[in-house]
Amino acid sequence: MVQAYVLIQTEVGRAEVVAKQLAALPGVISAEYVTGPYDVVLRISAETLTALQSDVMPSVQQVTGITRTLTCPIANGAQP
């Protein structure tokens, strides 16, 4: 199992709505809207890194209101 954090910037005022939409997507473990340079922090998972890139991330990036994403795969493999 591969997991990653996705740091997301959204259009102004859209963080809460975007986080709620992302929380419903397959492969999403958690979605929280936050303050700071990013608006939403997402935790995602898939069986492989390839599946994460080809199955989970495209659905994340199609959510309306997202302007930029930064994906950070978790290196230590620890489970929550």
Image (tube, rainbow, N blue to C red):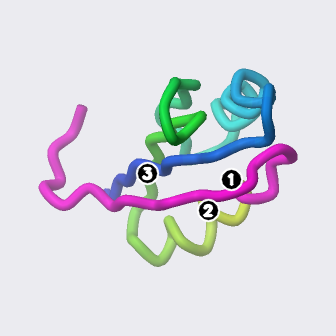
Which three-letter amino acid code belongs to the residue tagged 3? Answer: Ser
Q: Are marks 3 and 1 in contact (CB under 8 Å)?
A: no
State the residue at coordinates (70%, 65%). 58
Foreground disc of the pair 3, 1: 1
State the residue at coordinates (72%, 42%). 10
Q: Secondary structure at mark 3?
A: strand
Identify the disc placed on residue 45: 3
- Cα separation, mark 3 vs mark 1, equals 12 Å
Residue that extends furthest to the right in the rendered view of this protein? 64
Q: Are marks 1 and 2 in contact (CB under 8 Å)?
A: yes
Q: Which residues are magenta?
A: 60-80
Q: Is residue 70 above or below residue 65?
A: below
- Cα separation, mark 1 vs mark 2, equals 5 Å
The answer to if 71 sits in the magenta stretch is yes
Q: Secondary structure at mark 2?
A: helix
**Mark 2 surroundings within 10 Å by alpha-carbon count, few (fewer than 14), some (14 through 19), many (20 or more):** some
**Mark 1 surroundings within 10 Å by alpha-carbon count, few (fewer than 14), some (14 through 19), many (20 or more):** many
Identify the disc placed on residue 60: 1
Which three-letter amino acid code belongs to the residue tagged 2? Answer: Met
Task: Give x and y (percent) for residue 15.
Answer: 70, 29
State the residue at coordinates (19%, 61%). 75
State the residue at coordinates (52%, 25%). 34
Compare marks 3 and 1 and give the one earlier in the sequence: 3
Q: Secondary structure at mark 1?
A: helix
Which three-letter amino acid code belongs to the residue tagged 1? Answer: Val
Q: Is residue 48 above or below residue 18?
A: below
The answer to if 38 sits in the magenta stretch is no
